[in-house]
């Protein structure tokens, strides 16, 4: 195969003029093509959302202290790379924060095979041979949401932190050295209806984490706005105990504001390969949108109060480290569903299809997302879905070919790495240009070796080699000339 595979579209691709813009300083961080943040022009190329692959049941919620109404799952990646799932055990329908709610854990080395350790910490149903890590905790077990704190200098006694609580109790801050034995960090709630001025708050999953990109603790939690719509608010803290007044997040697309929909759980978290980018695999709630008849609901043994609403998972992002313009919005480049309810009646019921918090690695080229399914049914379980690493979305180009041009940027590093895939007939070439669109000699599209294949970390080669350090620190644009290919992410590597 000749390296001039894309020559028929090169001339058209090279004719695109670029407008003057202030450069984006990306340093050597990884940038995913999940929005228009870096993209200036698209011609024959589009941003495409990808569908996660159903990998089957991760584990059943079948213990006596778990049951039909278990959920609110958080995936925590431990220091050794293993995973721990925290989730609410709730066998019967009862009020939020009732004493029948407990917090349980399941553990896995690979994200595929799960066990429930016998921790001998709390007695339930006459035995301590269970995986319960918290109970009778003043409503915190309703939505207990932990994380492993990676703040530099954090005391080992506070290596794990968590939020838990409802509108009645307020949000309690918790700490733990091992993630099993928990204690309150303060007797009083750290957030309450006195400090969060919305009509209904906290009953969903309240998501805190340490932000490496922002150098502070941040929290995303659900409120109800003045129109009775479930929305997401954000607060910040330097010590996890004192939190700023919340701001209400809006939604936007590349073309303007996005529709406001009910977001039941937001599941906002830093993506582990690009911690400046927060991804939100959120539960979109459609109240009173009923699919099943009463007879169909009875046939699958769903609780009769839980089949008159439906939900699915959507994909959003936010980039708060980029400044105030990004701080108060979720990007909804993709308004369509990300994970649809499964085939059959069981997942077209209320409160099913709620994603777990955190996208986690489950292989060298794979990440996984976990979703609660069969809610309010005897078959309630957690299900695993997989994606290619960085593969939420891509710059996608069909067989006819096309090109994409970035905004001006400043990078640090010696080599440009692509996460990409092509067909046997496809390919990607990269040109580096000045901000006005003029090609830089030695780094033009014609100088670039055709990138063909399917790799997570392919170094781009020009006639002179892979070294681009002579251009580091200078404003440039990238031009991607593509055919039958997907480009998922880029990263300049080898920064000193």
Image: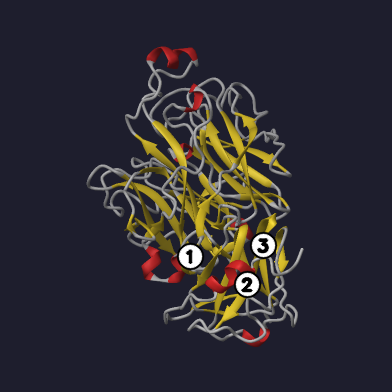
The answer to whether marks 2 and 3 mark residues whose Cβ atoms lie closer than 8 Å is no
Give how far apart the Cα atoms at labels 3 and 1 are.
Answer: 17 Å
Q: Which label's residue is closer to the chain start, 1 or 2? A: 1
- The answer to which image quadrant residue 249 occupies is bottom left
Residue 430: which numbered mark, if any? 2
Identified at 32% across, 29% down, the residue is 288
The local secondary structure at tag 3 comes to: strand
- Would you call the spot at circle 3 few (<14 residues within 10 Å), some (14-19), or many (20 or more)? many
The local secondary structure at tag 1 comes to: strand
Give how far apart the Cα atoms at labels 1 and 2 are.
Answer: 14 Å
Return the residue nearer the eye: 156 or 250.
250
Q: Which residue lies furthest to the front in this view?
A: 8
Q: Name the residue under label 1.
A: 42
Residue 331 image point, x, y percent: 42, 57
Which corner quadrant holds the N terminus?
bottom right
- Would you call the spot at circle 1 few (<14 residues within 10 Å), some (14-19), or many (20 or more)? some
Question: Marks 2 and 3: which is nearer the front?
Answer: 3
Up the image or down, 287 lies above or below 255; here it is above
The answer to whether marks 3 and 1 mark residues whose Cβ atoms lie closer than 8 Å is no
Up the image or down, 456 lies above or below 203; here it is below
Residue 407 image point, x, y percent: 48, 74
Residue 110 image point, x, y percent: 73, 44
Q: In this view, does 106 lie to the left or right of 134?
A: right
The local secondary structure at tag 2 comes to: strand
Q: Mark 3 points at which residue?
A: 427
Which corner quadrant holds the C terminus?
bottom right
Residue 83 seen anywhere in this rendered image of the structure: yes
Residue 188 seen anywhere in this rendered image of the structure: no
Return the residue nearer the eye: 200 or 7.
7
- Would you call the spot at circle 2 few (<14 residues within 10 Å), some (14-19), or many (20 or more)? many
Identified at 51% across, 46% down, the residue is 145
């Amino acid at each position: 195969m000749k390296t001039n595979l894309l020559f028929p579209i090169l001339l058209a691709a090279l004719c695109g003029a670029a407008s003057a813009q202030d450069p984006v300083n990306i340093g050597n961080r990884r940038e995913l093509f999940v929005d228009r943040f870096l993209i200036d022009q698209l011609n024959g190329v589009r941003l495409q959302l990808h569908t996660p692959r159903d990998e089957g049941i991760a584990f059943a919620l079948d213990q006596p202290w778990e049951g039909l109404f278990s959920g609110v799952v958080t995936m925590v990646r431990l220091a050794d790379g293993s995973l721990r799932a925290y989730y609410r055990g709730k066998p019967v329908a009862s009020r939020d924060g009732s004493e029948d709610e407990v917090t349980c854990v399941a553990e896995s080395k690979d994200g595929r095979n799960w066990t429930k350790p016998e921790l001998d910490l709390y007695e339930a149903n006459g035995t301590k041979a269970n995986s319960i890590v918290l109970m009778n905790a003043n409503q915190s077990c309703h939505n207990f949401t932990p994380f492993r704190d990676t703040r530099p200098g954090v005391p080992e006694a506070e290596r794990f932190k968590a939020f838990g609580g409802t509108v009645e109790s307020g949000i309690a801050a918790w700490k733990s050295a091992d993630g099993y034995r928990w204690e309150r960090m303060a007797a009083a709630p750290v957030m309450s209806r006195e400090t969060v001025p919305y009509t209904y708050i906290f009953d969903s999953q309240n998501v805190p984490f340490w932000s490496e990109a922002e150098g502070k603790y941040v929290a995303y939690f659900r409120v109800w706005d003045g129109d009775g719509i479930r929305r997401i608010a954000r607060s910040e803290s330097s010590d996890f105990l004192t939190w700023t007044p919340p701001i209400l997040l809006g939604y936007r697309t590349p073309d303007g504001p996005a529709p406001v929909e009910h977001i039941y759980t937001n599941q906002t978290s830093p993506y582990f390969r690009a911690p400046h980018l927060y991804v939100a695999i959120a539960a979109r709630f459609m109240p009173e949108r009923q699919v099943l008849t009463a007879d169909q609901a009875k046939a699958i043994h769903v609780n009769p109060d839980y089949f008159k609403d439906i939900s699915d998972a959507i994909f959003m992002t936010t980039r708060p480290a980029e400044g105030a313009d990004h701080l108060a919005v979720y990007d909804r480049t993709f308004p369509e569903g990300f994970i649809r309810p499964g085939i059959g009646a069981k997942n077209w019921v209320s409160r099913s299809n709620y994603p777990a918090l955190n996208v986690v690695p489950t292989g060298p080229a794979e990440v996984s997302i976990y979703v609660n399914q069969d809610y309010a049914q005897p078959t309630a379980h957690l299900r695993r879905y997989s994606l290619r690493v960085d593969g939420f979305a891509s710059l996608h180009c069909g067989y006819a070919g096309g090109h994409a041009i970035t905004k001006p940027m400043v990078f640090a590093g010696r080599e440009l790495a692509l996460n990409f895939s092509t067909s046997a007939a496809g390919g990607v070439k990269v040109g580096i240009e000045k901000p006005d669109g003029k090609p830089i000699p030695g780094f033009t599209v014609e100088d670039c070796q055709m990138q063909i294949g399917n790799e997570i970390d392919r170094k781009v080669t020009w006639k002179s080699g892979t070294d681009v350090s002579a251009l580091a620190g200078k404003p440039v644009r990238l031009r991607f000339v593509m055919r039958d290919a997907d480009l998922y992410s880029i990263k300049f590597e080898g920064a000193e």
